[in-house]
Amino acid sequence: MPELAMGVDVGLARVGVAVSDPHGVLATPVMTLRRDAKKNSDLRMLLRIIADRGVSEVFVGEPRSLSGQDTESTRMARAYAIDLAERAHEAQQELSVYLIDERLSTVSAHRMLHESGRKMQQHREVVDQVAAVNILQQVLDARRNDARVQASRVVVK
């Protein structure tokens, strides 16, 4: 099975998930998971998707402010990425988890959905997936152009 990359957009209520094609050219949406901070069912489901699809790298969007400062959303995404990396390590899954700057990915996702003719009320169901696609496509495009991917690896101790 070819190794795949995954993009993850973490929000308070939902987590958008996207994966690459086997050639690392195109990011496609997979699903939107409902966040469940008490039971962590979203993290368990994400790990199952990772294992089932043979994902070897996960890029979690790190939403910073326009000035580059941390926000509450930045801290939440970081905590999620760390939790994901730790759970994968405990389950002995070979997985590299990275944080990648994703300023405006959700804004861009809303714009893309609007331009495609989708009504604003319909955005909620797919905007997180589109944001995850944007995060992952940024990585795939950089690699295809032999550019350095600006991401920080999450290290599990």
Image (cartoon, grey):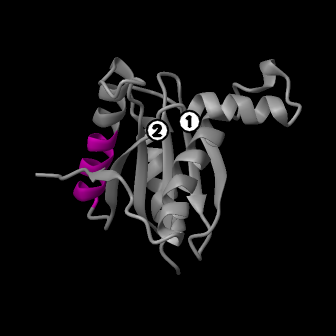
Q: Which residue, given by chain and number where applicable, does mark 2 sit on? A: 102
Is 87 part of what is drawn in magenta?
yes
Q: Say whether residue 89 is left or right of residue 122.
A: left
Is 109 part of what is drawn in magenta?
no
Give the residue drawn at x 61%, y 69%: 25
Element assignment for label 2: loop
Residue 131 locus on image (x, y percent) = 59, 39
Under mark 2, the amino acid is: Glu
Residue 113 locus on image (x, y percent) = 77, 33
Q: Say whether residue 152 is left or right of residue 25.
A: left
In this view, the residue in front, 47 or 73, is: 73
In this view, the residue in front, 9 or 1, is: 9
Point out the stretch of residues depicted in magenta: 81-91
Element assignment for label 1: helix
Q: Which residue, given by chain and number where applicable, does mark 1 sit on? A: 105
Residue 85 locus on image (x, y percent) = 28, 51
Residue 141 locus on image (x, y percent) = 55, 62
Query: Most prominent secondary structure in the magenta stretch?
Result: helix
Q: Are marks 1 and 2 in contact (CB under 8 Å)?
A: yes
